[in-house]
Image: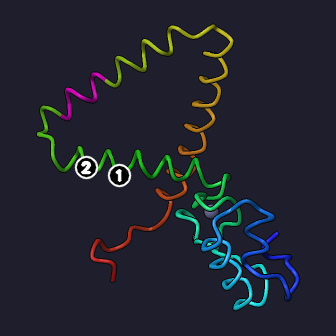
Amino acid sequence: MIASAPATATAVELAGELGLPRELVAWNLKRFRRAGGWYCVLKLPPCTECGEPVVGPPKQITHLACVPAREARWVRVKRQQLKATLSPEALAERRDWEREGCKRYYHGLPPERQAVLFAKWHATGQRDYEITREVARQPPRPLDGR
Ligand SMILES: [Zn+2]
């Protein structure tokens, strides 16, 4: 209403029509008239993962498609922090604890889901095996990178 007010409208008239404080209406009316109409600042923050601009709600700073990558990064960072701060014994203890948790989770799943997960891990293992074989066939490179 304030933004679409005719150029002849005064803050007092508009405040009366809107039932709002005159100072507030006057401040906004002045803002709109100085800016030449309705405006808002357009911000396109870079995505936290891919760096491309994010178009969406103001608080969205990651593309929806990049959310899994962000979560994976958080896990990596958390793991690096643990590796840097925990003793080797505490790390081994934590690994054992995580492995037990995975085993409990896996054995609690229905057989169909277990089969799906197993097939997925098998496919990943096969893929990694082929990559490893391909790298192993390459002639050795010097360790210092020359
Ligand atoms: Zn992204």
Under 8 Å from ligand 1: the CB of mark 1? no
Indicate the colouring scheme. rainbow
Crowding at dot 1, Cα within 10 Å, few <14 / some 14-19 / many 20+, comes out as few
- The residue wearing badge 2 is 81
> How far across and how far down the image is residue 133, in percent?
52, 51
Quadrant location of the C terminus? bottom left
* Magenta residues (range): 91-97
Residue beneath the point at 61% across and 55% down: 66
- Against 28, residue 67 (above or below) is above
Would you say 34 lies left or right of 127 here? right
- The residue wearing badge 1 is 77
Indicate the amino acid at tag 2.
Answer: Gln
- Against 146, residue 72 (above or below) is above
> How far across and how far down the image is residue 19, in percent?
73, 59
Residue 33, which numbered label? none
Labels 1 & 2 near each other (Cβ < 8 A): yes
Q: Secondary structure at mark 1?
A: helix
> How far across and how far down the image is residue 71, in percent?
50, 47
Viewer-proximal residue among 37 and 9? 9
Quadrant location of the N terminus? bottom right
Crowding at dot 2, Cα within 10 Å, few <14 / some 14-19 / many 20+, comes out as few
Residue beneath the point at 23% across and 44% down: 82
Q: Secondary structure at mark 2?
A: helix
Residue beneath the point at 68% across and 62% down: 20
The dominant secondary structure in magenta is helix
Ligand 1 quadrant in view: bottom right
